[in-house]
Amino acid sequence: MENSKLQELFNELSIEEKIGQLFQATGAVYEEEAVISGPVKELGINERDIYLAGSVLGTMGAKKTKQIQKKYMEKHPHHIPLLFMLDIINGYKTVYQIPLGQGAAFEPELARKCASMAAREAAADGLHVTFSPMADLVRDARWGRVMEATGEDVYLNSVYARAMVEGYQGEDLSDKETLAACVKHFAGYGAAEAGRDYNTVELSERTLRDFYLPAYESGIQAGAELVMTSFNTIDGIPATINKKLMRDVLRKEMGFDGVLISDFGAIGETIIHGVSEDRADAARRALEAGVDIDMMSGVYPQTLCQLLDEKKIELERIEECAWRVLKLKNKLGLFENPYKGVDEGVAEEQILCQEHKELAETMATKSFVLLENKNNILPLSKGKKVLFAGPYVNRQEMLGAWSFTGDISDTITIQQAAEKKMKNYEVCFCQGCPILPKEMKLDGFVNYKEEEFTEKEIEKMLTEAESKAEQADVVVLALGEHFLQSGEATSRAMIEIPENQMKLLERIEKINPNIVVVLFNGRPLDIRKIKQRAKAILEVWMPGTMGGNAIVDMLVGNNAPSGKLPMSFPYCVGQIPVHYDELNTGRVHVPGRDKDRYVSKYLDIENKPLYAFGYGLTYTDFHISEPVLNKNTMRKGEKIVASVKVKNCGERSGAETIQLYIHDVAASVARPKKQLKGFQKIELQPQEEQEVSFAISEEMLRFTREDGVFASEEGEFEVFIGNSSEEERKTKFVLKDA
Ligand code: BGC
């Protein structure tokens, strides 16, 4: 619709209708014909509010969404279509690797393809908006939502946020295969104190700006149509009603002109935070901060009219929000076609089609990180007797916590894949133990129940695994977190694999030391004990629908691992937060000089994590030369080229991710020890050598200076190029203003 026409329509809307556009209800109320019950009733809204609401959360399915849209539009005084929104986080029906694993691929292009695949499936099934990407920077593995992030690094997160937004939205939002993307959770949600979800966030403005904000901004610059507020406080004020954050930083500085939506119930929660006095006050504050849509608080429909009558808010504030929502509907082409993209036939054709499954398998393959491989136990030598044991051997629940759109019965398990692909081996399988200890209940997860076993049955499982292990050359143990142990509201203070699985590992080790652990998890875990006991560890995260195939192909060497950790694996919980881009202290501990007393170190463990950011092995060895620069002085506007020669010294082809890190030696504020500024994944045949170069520009050297300006400063910079953040070989250049 032309802008002038949209404006005409807008002018015709009553105030109530405009307010309606600012409210989002769950799909359940529409599916049940506007039955106002349960949590919706508690929001204090009525049937009329439901039929004036602008958007729906959590309904999917071509037939269902079409029916709801039709009925809703008939009832709406101006027949304005609804927006259907949903969390499509790592795929829709074809579920691919969780975002943390996608980060490990160091292949944003692949994430872009996955996002457009998800958009294709979901749009055909009636959806318009996805609440993705989550661009929150994460440094605390106790926080369950690290699985939804792409890791601890500001640069990596930024390139992924951009790629995902572009993937979902495509070139044209009115195209039937696209979704509008929502960058979340603005801002700093990943910094919850002590890793406890929804907890207070305490960040200096400099840390917020230099580390936490850039990835959101990158998604916004890529054209994200929506941004979601976060549950936490920023500088003591809940983000959702934080005027400075939303009006000054998001709208003015970042130039975001799209729809700002609250997180689920977050406007109402500002009362519990102890900042808003009551629901009306919460609504007023959120509106003043410029929050356009109230997701499931009900405070907008309930209080805005009255606030307006009492002159506590200005009509203009409501109108700016409603206008933004209508503009989004228009961009999506909903006024021309309220059923944009919805098509049962297309949905059937697209969903889980061969092309999508192949992409999901590639994403899984590229995301796996080989953490250990003693005596080159992997890939498994042909002809060997291989026992697959552990709760993940024949388990389909490997889709991650947001996989409710997918169907686990579409998932290929390790056993299914191995039976097909391992004809040159002697394979056998057993579960070994349940996924969780008997006493561990997944409290709060309604509708989910694990199979229960008696003590006797559990012991039988263990002894079966032991006797099979005795006969085997190699034991592949598929272990890890339950998929519901990571995700929203799943903070953990102890981040080891469940203890009953550890017991399986310990008992098998006594019988057969040739152990390969395939590790499933949504967060970095404390895997010290696994490291001691296993010869190889293959980190597979929550690999998605095609996980089984990808894992088996990796184990037998049809593919080689190429993933790198997007987040440090701590040595233990006491070390958290541990991240590679920390600042130097005035008292640096030099590894090996443990008798130095007054330095920044622990008495009981090393400072460095068990596995660092950027680390990951493969089946061959690469030699990387010392970095060289084409010149040693950079003047503003110029570039320096840094390069290394990379050689595959092994006997197999393989891929390596070459990473560029820079350190600003002396600046007006302390700068990270090193920061990722670029990476390139290359593939080399045995004995092949290739030069890898990076162009370093002045823009890469900028930060929030002492004077608050985001700019670079003259002086010396160190350049590191290697295959993990632990690379210490370096060279230097000097930046000069003129
Ligand atoms: C989560 C968001 C999500 C929303 C809607 C909230 O609880 O924090 O990330 O998009 O629910 O499902």
Image: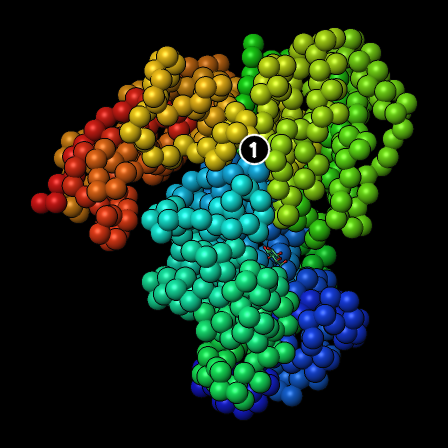
Task: Report the residue that reaches farthest toward the bottom.
Answer: 12
Task: Report the residue that reaches farthest toward the left.
Answer: 738
Question: What type is the residue that disc 1 sits on?
Answer: Pro
Observer able to see residue 197: yes
**Displayed quadrant of residue 450:** top right
Q: Is mark 1 within 8 Å of ligand 1?
A: no
Element carrying mark 1: loop
Within-10-Å neighbours for mark 1: few <14, some 14–19, many 20+: many
Q: Nearer the viewer, residue 40 or 404?
A: 40
Residue at 57% in and 38% down: 142
Q: Nearer the viewer, residue 291 or 119?
A: 291
Q: Is residue 278 left or right of residue 601?
A: right
**Displayed quadrant of residue 425:** top right
Q: Is residue 341 left or right of residue 133?
A: right
Q: Quadrant of the C terminus?
A: top left
| Position of residue 518 measured from the top left corner of the image (x, y, whole percent) | 65, 25
| Position of residue 648 measured from the top left corner of the image (x, y, whole percent) | 41, 19
**Displayed quadrant of residue 551:** top right
- For the image, the number of numbered tags is 1
Residue at 25% in and 30% down: 718
| Position of residue 585 measured from the top left corner of the image (x, y, whole percent) | 32, 31
Residue at 72% in and 79% down: 46
In the depicted structure, whether residue 568 falls above or below residue 294: above
Q: Nearer the viewer, residue 499 or 85?
A: 499
Q: Quadrant of ligand 1?
A: bottom right
Observer able to see residue 81: no
Residue wearing tag 1: 524
